[in-house]
Amino acid sequence: MTAPIDFYFDFSSPYGYLASLVIDDLAARHGRAVAWRPILLGVVFKTTGQSPLLDQPLRGEYARRDIARAARELGAPFRLPETFPINAMAASRAFYWLAGGSAARAREFARAAFAAIFVEGCDMGPPPAVIALARAKGFDADAMAKALEEQAVKDRLRSEVEAAMARGVFGSPYVVVDGEPFWGLDHLPQVERWLATGGW
Amino acid sequence: MTAPIDFYFDFSSPYGYLASLVIDDLAARHGRAVAWRPILLGVVFKTTGQSPLLDQPLRGEYARRDIARAARELGAPFRLPETFPINAMAASRAFYWLAGGSAARAREFARAAFAAIFVEGCDMGPPPAVIALARAKGFDADAMAKALEEQAVKDRLRSEVEAAMARGVFGSPYVVVDGEPFWGLDHLPQVERWLATGGW
């Protein structure tokens, strides 16, 4: 089977960021590509009744510790931005707009956005921040600025989020391998065993 | 460091059951014992605002699949009881009462209770079911029946649950190694690396 595996994430998700650092290599070890698919957990949470993880009693405190520990284990730079969670809408719209031209360029942008958020600690919520990042990284920022206002671009993100939810996606990262879903950074070793063995 | 590691679980937690099958061997590989500590997630959820996992939209459906998959991966027998979640209060009280005499016997009882629930599919909620299991497994069932009515036994469980929450425990399984907390079956490999390396 050579279909890409699906990698769902929210730009505001620390676990999504950490997964983004390893998912391509993981898949490549098994001859697979990865389709990156940003979603908006805020929309999903309206269905599942969850609240943002870091705001939850007991769980939030644990998550801060767990995320930092996972980053250290991966040797990944990490900081939690002062503004958190961030609103991932503009970055996600920009991603899908770029993906319409080149999946590779969209992924490049996603990596830059994740680094801006979780390495530099920037608030990538406001559209001007997203556009400034795009400009700094050599994307066509003027075209992006226009695109972010277009209904078709807004609709694309909405339909992606709806399709993800229809598929059962409720968290970040959330990986689907040949129809088999895996939620969470801690499931990546299981994703790898699934790819290696074809499932059990 | 030779202090035991703490293993918190709810008798009604499928992930807790699966962890119970491997935690002792995992710890023993690093020269450590395990202190088993049943808790009542229902009490914890009043603080964290969580609802039972399997009842949650999207997450519940995923969890059923994830639990069955984890059981298959471990080669562990598993079924979800028809009555679920079960009320773990009587089993937990029985555990701590037994632990007052012998930690090893209490653990033996815990293994039997988990097997009754997640292998046989029994409802171990009602005290008579717990007492019948104890009798069948050679414990002093008559003494247990009396103990389950004693205020001191009830207080012991309450204080264990309160102490666990004060320590930040909010899920099952939840393992603490030298003060470092790890939540979830999927964190057991990380628990093992922590034991092997002393942390990072």
Image (tube, coloured by chain):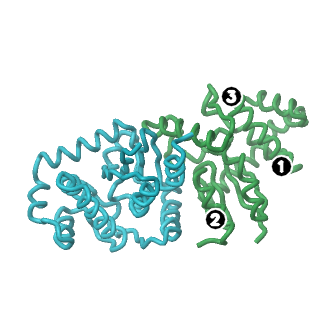
Chain colours: A cyan, B green
The amino acid marked with disc number 1 is Ala
* Tags 2 and 3 on a common chain: yes
Residue that protrudes farthest toward the top in the picture: B82
Image x and y of residue A104, in percent: 26, 59
The amino acid marked with disc number 2 is Arg
Image x and y of residue B14, in percent: 63, 40
**Label 3 to label 1: alpha-carbon separation:** 25 Å
Vertical relation: B176 (above or below) B49: below
Image x and y of residue A76, in percent: 45, 71
* Tags 3 and 1 on a common chain: yes
Q: Secondary structure at mark 3?
A: loop
Can residue A71 be seen in this snapshot?
Answer: yes
Q: Quick check: B130 left or right of B51? A: right
Identify the residue shown where x is 68% and y is 28%: B121
Between disc 3 and disc 1, whose residue precedes?
Answer: 1
Identify the residue shown where x is 43% and y is 36%: B57
Query: Label 1 lies in what chain?
Result: B
Image quadrant where residue B52 sits? top right
Q: Secondary structure at mark 2?
A: helix
Task: Identify the residue under disc 2.
Answer: B193
* Tags 2 and 1 on a common chain: yes
Between disc 2 and disc 3, whose residue precedes?
Answer: 3
Task: Identify the residue under disc 3.
Answer: B121
Location of the C terminus of chain A (image quadrant) = top right
Task: Identify the residue under disc 1.
Answer: B99
Q: Nearer the viewer, residue B1 or B67?
A: B67
